[in-house]
Structure formats: C-alpha cells, structure tokens
Amino acid sequence: MTPSDQHADPAEAPPSIVLGIETSCDETAAAIVRREAAGTGSIVSSVVRAQIEAHAPYGGVVPEIAARAHVEIIDTVVSRALSEADLAFAELDGIAATAGPGLLGGVLVGLVSAKALAVAARRPFIAINHLEGHALTVGLTDAVRPPYLLLLVSGGHTQTLIVEAVGRYRLIGTTLDDALGEAFDKTAKLLGLGFPGGPAVAAAARNGRMGRISLPRPMLGRPEPHFSFAGLKTAVRQQAQALAPLSDDDIANLCVAFEDAAADVVADRVSNAMEGYVEALPGAPRSLVVAGGVAANVRLREQLATLAEENSFHLTVPPVELCTDNAAMIAWAGAERLALGETSPLDSPARARWPLDPTAEQVRGAGVKASGAALPRSLPA
Ligand code: KG4
Ligand code: ZN
C-alpha cells in the first residue's frame, strides 16, 4: 500500500464509492459500497455467483475448475454490479480486488480484471487481503469500529485476532491443523452429506439426539490460545466406522455431536482469547466480532452469545450472506484503505499465503485458505 494523501483520522475522509471484486475461492463476486465521511457504510449493489454444482461431484473445491469458472463469468458479474447500482466506472473512487490468500488461479482472475479496469477507468487500484475483508465487515454492516476481538472462522482459517485499527491486526490463536469450516466439510464428505459441508451438517444435526454419541473436545481448557480440529474429525470417522452401516438417525446423531463439540471448543478458545484481549488492551471496549462462513452456524452463534453475555462482551455477527464470501467486504476494505489515503501499485502480486499479522509466529497447519479437493486426473473440457 502506498499512502497518497494522508488523512489524520479516517473517519473524516470524504465520502467514497468503491467497486470490489472477489475470486479467491469458489464464489465469483462483485459489489459496490459507499463509505460516508463519518465512517459508516452501505451496500449499493452486491452480486455473488457460487460454483457449487461445478465442484459438487468432487466433494470439494477443485482449483482449476474454479479458475476457469471465474474467467467465464467475471465480466458479467462486474457489469451486473454496476448496472444494479446504476453507476458508470467514471463515478467510482476506487477499484479493489482480493489479492490473496486463496487459490492462486482464481485470485489472479479477479486481480487482473480489477487492475485492467482501474487503468482503463483511471481510478485508483487497491489490493485487499481476503481476511481483512472478513475482519472489517462489521464496520459496513453494524458500524462497529476497532478495537475489537475477532473470531475468524472460515473454510481455510480459524483464528482469534485483536483488530487494533484498519490495517493493524494482532494474532492471538490459530488452528494447529484443520480450519473449522474444513472440519465441517470433511465430516460432511465422510457421512455422504455432500458439498458444501457446513450447511449440510447443520441441517442433519437438527434431527439428531444429543448425548447418543460422545466426541472429544481438543484443546479445551489449554492455556495456549490455539485450536485443533483434526482429532475431532478422526473421532467422527471412528464412530461412523463402528456404527456402519449408518442409518439416517446415526448420521443425525453424529452431526449434532460434532457440532456440539466444535461449538464447545470454539467457545472455550474465545474465552481464552478474551483474557488475551483484555490484557493487551486494558480499558478497550469489550467487543467480540465473528466473521467467516462458519459464523453462519446457529449453534455456534448461540454458544458465543452466551459466552459474550457471561463475560460482558458485546457480540456482533454480520448477516449470514455477508459472513460467507462476498465482494461487499472487499469493496468495504478498499474504501477503508482509501479513507486512510492508501492505494496499491499495479504490480501488486497475487498471494497464496498472506497472514493478517505478519509478525505472528508461524504455526504448523495454519494460514492457507481452501486447500481444495484432490485434483482429478482429467478435467472436463
Ligand atoms: O468464509 P467462507 O465463505 O469461505 C472461505 O473463505 O473459506 O467459508 C466457507 C466455509 C465452508 O467450510 C462452509 O462449510 C462453512 O463456511 N459454512 C458453515 C455453515 N455455512 C457455511 N459451517 C457450519 N455451519 C454453517 N451453517
Ligand atoms: Zn472467506
């Protein structure tokens, strides 16, 4: 990022209209947001095209299929976002795109499109970290501004972070192995529930009976702030093998037990992070924000609401459609960066890995978004 015009306080920056593009996983998305001088925001248009059918036969996101699908539809999605907003390129103050972390083939499609549009329309370009998009969404949806404690739970990341300011993130805890969304997806695949797994497991769990199956709660009560879900996933597999052939009731009972164990672990780890947050920023507002696709999970939301109440934290969870991948969050992060006077050079690279807190110690297994399914031997033409 290069500061072009420093503002003392981003809240006092002039109003702006920013186009955002998101192609880092299996959603092709474009959106336009408006940021007011006071620092609040609104969505002018938001278009998301998911690629669920294209990946469903493989039980996970296939990187090359995702990249090809982004190429085919990106122009239509961007035009739709502009026409729904009734705006022309000349009326934009900036064009932002996800530059990582994610599946590189897909990231390149959105990044190159945004750069080309920025050059053609002579508008500033802003390269955005996908995780920053998730992290700052509450500014757009609920006018919540830093500092706050963030739980980021997506298909590729499970982290607790202190959001000190736009662009200043301090990592507290991260997963030592699988991300929570990944554990949901793998559990769904194992039980034959299809893709994407999170919503499928949650739906099956609604018919399950608690207490029929007991599962471990990895890391519960541990002093270090990290997460681990690989053992939980393995325990589901072992229980499923012991019960096979699985009835619908068995599947439902396994799903409710999995969801319950996962929610218990996350609540415990967030409780640990709350201590870290209060210690790091004494006197800061006790504010907990949840972001990423797994924030759509109702059981997890309920457990976090209880935890927040017990610890006098105010909980904010964006609406479901803004928890899962979308471009409004990328446009908003772009608007926040612009308000700080920051833009990006046109040679900004695509990055498969891009931690929000580059100073944090690297932890095994953490930091790569959407590892994807195994690449099939031959791809459809
Ligand atoms: O943030 P996101 O849309 O994409 C990434 O950046 O990874 O998150 C997608 C993840 C997937 O693993 C999906 O299974 C999970 O979010 N997910 C859920 C639910 N809805 C989506 N997990 C649990 N319960 C849900 N209701
Ligand atoms: Zn995401």
Image (cartoon, rainbow, N blue to C red):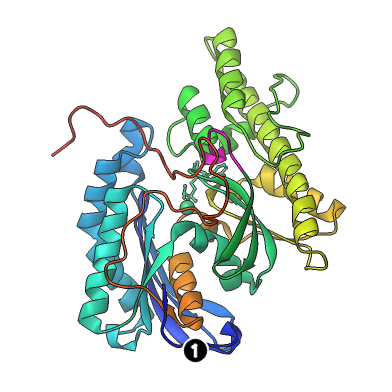
Q: State the residue at coordinates (61%, 45%).
A: 297
Q: Is residue 20 above or below residue 17?
A: above
Residue 177 part of the magenta-drawn span:
yes
Tell me if I can see residue 43 in this picture: no
Quadrant hosting residue 214:
top right
Residue 103 part of the magenta-drawn span:
no
Side of 231 relative to 220 (left or right): left
Q: State the residue at coordinates (29%, 63%).
A: 111
Residue 146: percent from left, percent from top: 66, 70
Residue 265: percent from left, percent from top: 70, 36
Residue sitting at the far left: 381
Residue 162: percent from left, percent from top: 66, 59
Residue that badge 1 annotates: 15
Side of 30 relative to 169 (left or right): left
Q: State the residue at coordinates (48%, 43%).
A: 156
Residue 26: percent from left, percent from top: 36, 49
* Residue toward you, 229 or 341: 341
Side of 89 relative to 181 (left or right): left
* Residue toward you, 60 or 278: 278
Q: Quadrant of the N terminus?
A: bottom left
Residues rendered magenta in the picture: 174-181
Q: Main secondary structure of the magenta part?
A: loop
- Characterize the local packing of mark 1: few (<14), some (14-19) or many (20 or more) Cα atoms within 10 angstroms: some
Q: Amino acid at mark 1?
A: Pro
Dot 1: what SS?
loop
Quadrant hosting residue 58:
top left
Tell me if I can see residue 335 in this picture: yes
Q: State the residue at coordinates (78%, 68%).
A: 284
Is the CB of mark 1 within 8 Å of ligand 2? Answer: no
Q: Quadrant of the C terminus?
A: top left
